[in-house]
Image: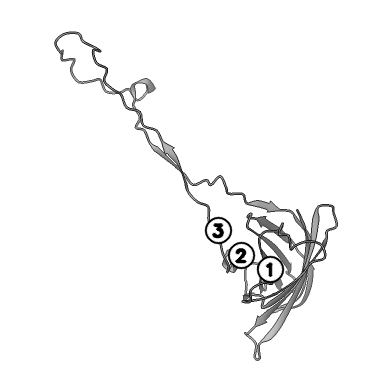
């Protein structure tokens, strides 16, 4: 589901051809000049138990590792969410799932809260263009985002994706927030940021369609 939620630019690793090495035997003038040629018969069959009698064929090695690939896990903590999303109404709980990845040119952070007794689960993912180290993501910043509209000058593109259902993985509602507000402050520990978000989703399964609002926050280590 998480990958299905990623509606924006995805990045793939580039293949790298490591190279190939060929070895060829060359003739040497005047070597083995021992008179008329003699017939020594067919060469003996190689002994599979004796590695010295076997030959190997040079191969070309292909590697898909990209030395510029620098995906780095983010340390995310203190996550919590509350609000309404789909059939999950008036929910409030700490996040049992807190994870993030910095891809260099963008970062993702995911939170998931659930209450199995009450029969709900909510999953939210933030995608931050420019990564968690973007200069706009500094304490005191307040970023307002509208889906489909270009971000303000100096503001990174930010997407908030959400899903809800009766249990984790059984998502009945999936969508991107129509609007979101991101507020940044100092985290609880040195070298961390505290990011709070308010995301408004349109639930058009209702008549008339309704706005569902999810609030959440987390600390992330820089």
Kindly report the distance in space between the C-alpha atoms of the residues bearing marks 2 and 1.
9 Å
Q: Quadrant of residue 39?
A: top left
Kindly report the distance in space between the C-alpha atoms of the residues bearing marks 1 and 3.
22 Å
Query: Which residue in the rendered view is the most extreme toward the bottom?
Result: 208
Write the residue at 58% across / 49% down.
69
**Residue 2, position in %: x, y?**
61, 64
Q: Quadrant of residue 48?
A: top left
Looking at the image, do the residues carrying marks 2 and 1 touch, with CB atoms under 8 Å apart?
A: yes
Neighbour class for label 2 at 10 Å: few (<14), some, many (≥20)? few
- Looking at marks 1 and 3 on the same chain, the residue that comes earlier in the sequence is marked by 3
Which marked residue is nearer to the observer: mark 3 or mark 2?
Answer: 3
Report the side of 216 relative to 62 (left or right). right
**Residue 6, position in %: x, y?**
59, 66
Mark 2 residue element: helix
Circle count: 3
Mark 1, residue position:
123
Mark 2, residue position:
2
Write the residue at 71% across / 73% down.
120
């Amino acid at each position: 589901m998480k990958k299905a939620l990623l509606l924006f630019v995805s990045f793939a690793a580039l293949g790298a051809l490591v190279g190939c090495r060929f070895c060829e035997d060359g003739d040497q003038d005047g070597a083995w000049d021992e008179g008329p040629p003699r017939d020594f018969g067919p060469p003996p069959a190689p002994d599979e138990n004796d590695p010295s009698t076997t030959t190997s064929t040079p191969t070309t090695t292909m590697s898909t590792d990209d030395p510029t690939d620098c995906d780095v896990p983010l340390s995310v903590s203190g996550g919590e969410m509350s609000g309404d999303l789909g059939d999950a109404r008036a929910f409030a709980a700490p996040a049992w799932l807190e994870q993030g990845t910095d891809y260099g040119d963008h970062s993702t952070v995911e939170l998931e809260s659930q209450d199995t007794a009450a029969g709900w689960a909510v999953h939210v993912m933030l995608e931050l263009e420019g990564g968690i180290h973007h200069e706009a993501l500094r304490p005191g910043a307040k970023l307002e985002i509208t889906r489909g509209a270009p971000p303000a000058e100096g503001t990174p593109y930010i997407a908030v994706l959400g899903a809800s259902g009766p249990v984790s993985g059984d998502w009945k509602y999936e969508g991107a927030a129509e609007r979101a507000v991101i507020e940044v402050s100092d985290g609880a520990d040195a070298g961390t940021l505290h990011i709070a978000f308010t995301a408004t989703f349109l639930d058009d399964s209702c008549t008339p369609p309704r706005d569902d609002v999810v609030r959440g926050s987390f600390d992330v280590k820089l």
